[in-house]
Amino acid sequence: MYQIKSPVLFTLFNRPDTAYRVFQKIRAGKPPKLYVAADGPRRDRDGEAALCEEARKVIQVDWECEVHTLYRPENLGCKVAMSGAVKWFFEQEEEGIILEDDCLPDESFFTFCDTLLEKYRHDTRIAHIGGANLCLNKKFGDASYYFSRYTIIWGWASWRRVWQNYDENLLLLDGFIQEDLFKYIYKKKTVTDQLIKTLNVVKSNALVTWDFQYVFMNFWNNSLCIVPNKNLISNIGFDTRATHTADTRSKFANLPTEPLGEITHPKYFVPIIDADYYLLKLEEPPLTTKLKRIIVPVVKRLISSSH
């Protein structure tokens, strides 16, 4: 079993079953440093405190390891809890690997992250090392990975130098839109219109999340994101308990992983925009899936109040 070299941040909440499966992958790799962050239970959810406690009990470190914990006594929600956990991690580490409790990695994910964290440690063109390939077995280029503009956060690695620019409130978004800068990210207006719409919803807090802020940060910084040409992460969290992945019929649910093999590197440092377009076309429109649970109840209340 490959022994992980980099520090690992593992975030969890109220799903001890998925947390256990992911932790067993981390445990097998025996990282030298493990950071565990857990959000607290919601007051209005019966039985959730017990589930959160059970999830935390999954962490049984039986190897030589420096362990740090950030266990929240109360619920902060996805946006603050997750972004706060990553900030806490990078305040103490220059670089590392981040796994959520529903992102089940292939063993070669850790090799991939360790290798590329070292290779691109001081290369400010590279901001993000992703572990998930959501292009459904379509390969781009001859190397083990390609460069993208789009940031996928189902199992990833990065550096403090990148995360220090993170802004959970999207303060630069309005200016970016007013100066029409999205056209330099993607030429297709249908793509940029959807991104702008989604980011505005996130900024308004109608969609409470942390990841689109990270996506935008890498846009305005003109950064490159790494995507493996084989899928190294299976998201096992598509169920009714999930915050943003409740649709069990999603084409991205429980995707199989595949060992990466020997790592080969691209010759050229250019984003493969066709790969991004292919992925964005595969994705269900973000507003359709993520906002349905928000918009539909509001509309129903408005209709009922008008009668």
Image: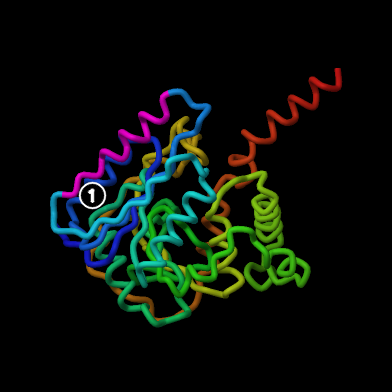
Q: Is residue 220 above or below residue 199?
A: below
Q: Is residue 90 above or below residue 126?
A: above
Q: Which residue is mark 1?
A: 25
Q: 8 or 155, which is in the foreground?
A: 8
Q: 144 or 69, which is in the foreground?
A: 69
Considering every residue shown, the one lying at the far top of the view is 307
Q: 220 or 163, which is in the foreground?
A: 163
Considering every residue shown, the one lying at the far front of the view is 73
Mark 1 is on which residue type?
A: Lys
Give how far across and how far down residue 33 sits, in percent: 25, 61
Give how far across and how far down residue 56 sits, in percent: 31, 40
Q: 292 or 263, which is in the foreground?
A: 292
Q: Tag 1: Cα neighbours inside 10 Å, few (<14), some, or many (≥20)?
A: some
Q: Main secondary structure of the magenta part?
A: helix
Indicate the quadrant where residue 212 lies.
bottom right
Q: Quadrant of the N terminus?
A: bottom left
Q: Residue at x 45, y 35 (%)?
A: 41
| Left-right relation of 66 to 127 | left
Asked if residue 56 lies in the magenta stretch, the reply is yes
Where disc 1 sits, the SS reads helix
Indicate the quadrant where residue 159 lies.
bottom left
* Segment tinted magenta in the rendering: 47-61
Q: Residue at x 18, y 57 (%)?
A: 30
How many numbered circles are shown?
Answer: 1
Asked if residue 97 lies in the magenta stretch, the reply is no
